[in-house]
């Protein structure tokens, strides 16, 4: 059955929906500026571009104050949710980034220490330096928790028959 009617869902947005989208985007920017304590910039945007977009939207289609209030409320909620999400995720991302930096630093130190014995980089001043290191020393020559975890994971991933053959039976 062929029909001359256009498909019910068109991929090209109509002019009214583009105008309402512009109103949404501009009001969202206003909300972001307000949440960043840039109230003067927010009011300039609100009374300038946003007001013009609202006028254009009203010319093309009838937009009621209730519809505008609903759009504004939805965008305020979106910005509040995004800000809350950022407050929660930012410390987690910073911690993960710090851990990744620490891991990269530790890995590069281990690599340097393994090559120091081959004469590729200067070695420790004297052999007694390693023995006199305090217990909380995190030098690359002392095994760390990450090394133990890595070793446990390596053993856990080993084939089952390989693990059993090493155990005394």
Image: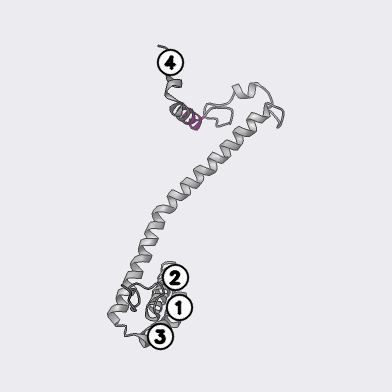
The one of 130 and 61 positioned closer to us in this rendering: 61
The residue where tag 3 is placed is 56
The residue closer to the viewer here, 108 or 19, is: 19
Mark 1 residue element: helix
Whether residue 11 appears in magenta in the rendering, the answer is no
Asked if disc 1 and disc 2 are in contact, CB closer than 8 Å, the reply is yes
The answer to whether residue 126 is above or below residue 73 is above
User: In the image as oriented, which residue stretches furthest toward the bottom?
Assistant: 59
Residue denoted by label 2? 33
Q: Whole-Å distance between the Cαs marked 3 and 2? A: 23 Å
Label 2: element kind: helix
Question: What's the distance in space between the residues labelled 4 and 3, CA to CA?
Answer: 79 Å
Q: In which quarter of the image is the C terminus?
A: top left
Marked residue nearer the N-terminal end (1 or 4): 1
Q: Distance between the residues labelled 1 and 4?
A: 73 Å
Q: Which residue is drawn at 61% across and 35% down?
A: 109
Q: What stretch is highlighted in magenta?
A: 144-151
Question: Could you tell me how many numbered marks the image carries?
Answer: 4
Residue 45: give its label. 1
Element class at badge 4: loop
Q: Mark 4 points at which residue?
A: 167
Q: Can residue 148 be found in the magenta stretch?
A: yes
């Amino acid at each position: 059955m062929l029909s001359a009617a256009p498909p019910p869902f068109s991929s090209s947005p109509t002019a009214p929906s583009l105008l309402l989208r512009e109103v949404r985007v501009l009001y969202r920017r206003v909300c972001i500026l307000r949440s960043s304590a840039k109230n003067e910039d927010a009011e300039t945007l609100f009374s300038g571009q946003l007001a013009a977009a609202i006028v254009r939207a009203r010319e093309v289609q009838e937009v009621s104050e209730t519809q505008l209030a609903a759009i504004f409320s939805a965008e305020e909620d979106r910005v509040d949710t995004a800000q809350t999400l950022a407050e929660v995720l930012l410390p987690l991302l910073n911690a993960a980034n710090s851990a990744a930096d620490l891991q990269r630093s530790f890995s590069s130190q281990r690599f340097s220490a393994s090559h120091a014995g081959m004469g590729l980089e200067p070695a420790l001043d004297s052999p007694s330096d390693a023995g006199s290191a305090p217990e909380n020393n995190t030098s690359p020559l002392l095994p760390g928790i990450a090394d133990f975890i890595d070793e446990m994971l390596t053993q856990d991933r080993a084939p089952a028959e390989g693990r059993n053959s090493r155990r005394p039976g």
